[in-house]
Image (cartoon, rainbow, N blue to C red):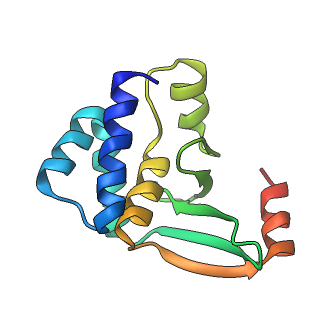
Amino acid sequence: MSKCSWVAESVWKDIESTSSVTDDQLSVLHFLFGKNFERATRIVDQRCVKRISGEPSGRSIFRVVGESRRKEEYLCFPEHYCSCYSFFYDIVNRGEQLCCKHQLAARLSASTGVCIDVKVSDEELAFLLSKL
């Protein structure tokens, strides 16, 4: 794990432990993620993050509405994957970023408890995941 990743994980764990974020934590995350973090905070402020949880398993995925005029929705796992173009281009292909704005928005909203929780059956969740 790189030093940046380690620092980010430490900050995320602190935020999760209190379900709130301080100005200092915001500054660190902005330093690490730059414009992607700024964009993520706008997405969170607009309440555009849903955590879709299957029942009875409790497994979940996030649906994040993008900032474009089309309001496209992306499915993501905050720490591992996003279905957006930027994830494949900037992260997987070029390795220029640690994660995309959708992943950051999902992580921030979940850590602070402001995401919209949606419960579905495990079968519905499996169908949703099959579209990835």
Q: Residue furthest left?
A: 23
Q: Where is residue 62 shown, x and y percent of the image?
A: 59, 62
Task: Please provide percent x and percent y for residue 115.
Answer: 45, 72
- Please identify the quarter of the rendering in which residue 89 is found: top right
Q: Based on the displayed image, in which of its 4 quarters is residue 53 positioned?
A: bottom right
Location of residue 58 by image quarter: bottom right
Q: Residue drawn 36% across and 61% down? A: 16
- Percent across and percent down for residue 31 are 22, 34
Give the camera-side residue of 43 and 56.
56
Residue 80 appears in the figure: yes
With 111 as the anchor, is 131 left or right in this view?
Answer: right
Query: In this picture, is 63 found above or below 36?
Result: below
Placement of 46 over or under 14, stated as above or below: below
Residue name at image x 45 percent, y 68 percent: 48
Q: Nearer the viewer, residue 45 or 70?
A: 45
Whether residue 67 can be seen here: no
Please name the residue shown 34% across and 23% down the image. 3
